[in-house]
Amino acid sequence: MNDIKLEVNNISKTYVSSKGESFRALKDVNLQVKDREFVALLGPSGCGKTTLLKLIAGLIEPSSGEILLDGKKIRGPGANRGMVFQKYSLFPWLNVWENIEFGLRLNGMPKEKRYELVEHYIRLIGLMGFENAYPRELSGGMQQRVAIARTMVTNPEILLMDEPFGALDTQTRSLMQELLLDVWEKDNKTVLFVTHDVEEAIFLADTIYVSTAQPGTIKAKIDVRIPRPRTFETKTSRRFLKLNKQLREMIREESIKAIQSRKRSEKTPARNLNVMEIFRTAIYNLI
Ligand SMILES: Nc1ncnc2c1ncn2[C@@H]1O[C@H](COP(=O)(O)OP(=O)(O)OP(=O)(O)O)[C@@H](O)[C@H]1O
Ligand SMILES: [Mg+2]
């Protein structure tokens, strides 16, 4: 049986600004995610991690190569993929319950079923008692928990997570990682998790793909081989420390290259604002 869920084949992406300047963000990226696997993509800032997730989400199109989900080519956004964005993306005018329920309402799910599901996820993310709170009344960690629940509740086949804990303090971040693993083990989802944090990648993933600095391409594939369930004690195990050292060296090399190439070119590419992309991003997970 072929248990490959997601296949990224020779993907390259060059952004072209309105002034005609081109910038190569990704070059010949290849990776695979198996059904129910937790895969991390690890790379320095600016190596194209968000770009790759947006391509998989169908928010933007590749310059060359193809992405297959269950063997079918991705041609646009779809309910089979759920994305948790790098920045908080809750609706400020809806409370916790309504934010999680929003997508289900849009899908026309009956009230009783919605109630059951939203309650289940609120329990799972430990936010009982906060159902009526608005995003501005929540801490960053709580907001990201709601964002994760809001994405998971619509039952996507694959969860795309873009540094969801990047803005949190170390302590909250580690608790959120444990919570995510707990939810993942209960829900059995396929996950592609993007991060530049080495420890986070090792702690969460079955497989880690390491990306080079710009243009991003895959430099190594690491089989984590640390038993589950993982706890905070995992972080002091021999295997964890060994991988930590190995991956830190790789990422350091790439970060230095990234800084040097920036110095050389002395120029940050102009971003072209694509209205369709902004609109699709805003309504993602709700369609
Ligand atoms: N719309 C755009 N137009 C032009 N260049 C872009 C656009 N979006 C991203 N880039 C460039 O592509 C490169 C990769 O960006 P991307 O956001 O994918 O990186 P990243 O790995 O997610 O970075 P970070 O870790 O900081 O989130 C960057 O150099 C960025 O400036
Ligand atoms: Mg990013």
Image (tube, rainbow, N blue to C red):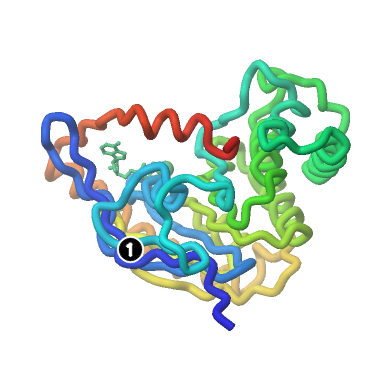
Nearer the observer, 155 or 217: 155
Q: Name the quadrant of the C terminus.
A: top right
In x, y percent, where is residue 266?
14, 37
Tell me if residue 244 can be seen. no
**Left or right side of 50 for 255:** left
Q: Residue at x 74, y 50 (%)?
A: 179
Q: Amino acid at mark 1?
A: Val
Whether 42 is drawn above or below 138: the answer is below
Count neighbours of disc 1 (C-alpha within 10 A) and say few if under 14, some if 14 to 19, many if 20 or more.
some
Nearer the observer, 244 or 5: 5
Q: Residue at x 52, y 47 (%)?
A: 78
In the picture of the structure, the residue carrying the numbered disc 1 is: 29
Whether 234 is drawn above or below 278: the answer is below
Q: Residue at x 74, y 26 (%)?
A: 98
In x, y percent, where is residue 23?
19, 44
In x, y percent, where is residue 17?
19, 34
**Left or right side of 80 for 75:** left
Nearer the observer, 75 or 234: 75
Q: Quadrant of ligand 2?
A: top left
Q: Residue at x 72, y 35 (%)?
A: 108
Among the 4 quarters of the image, the one containing residue 12: bottom left
Whether 252 is drawn above or below 209: the answer is above
**Is the CB atom of the residue marked by disc 1 within 8 angstroms of ligand 1's nearest atom?**
no
- Secondary structure under tag 1 reads strand
Nearer the observer, 159 or 247: 159
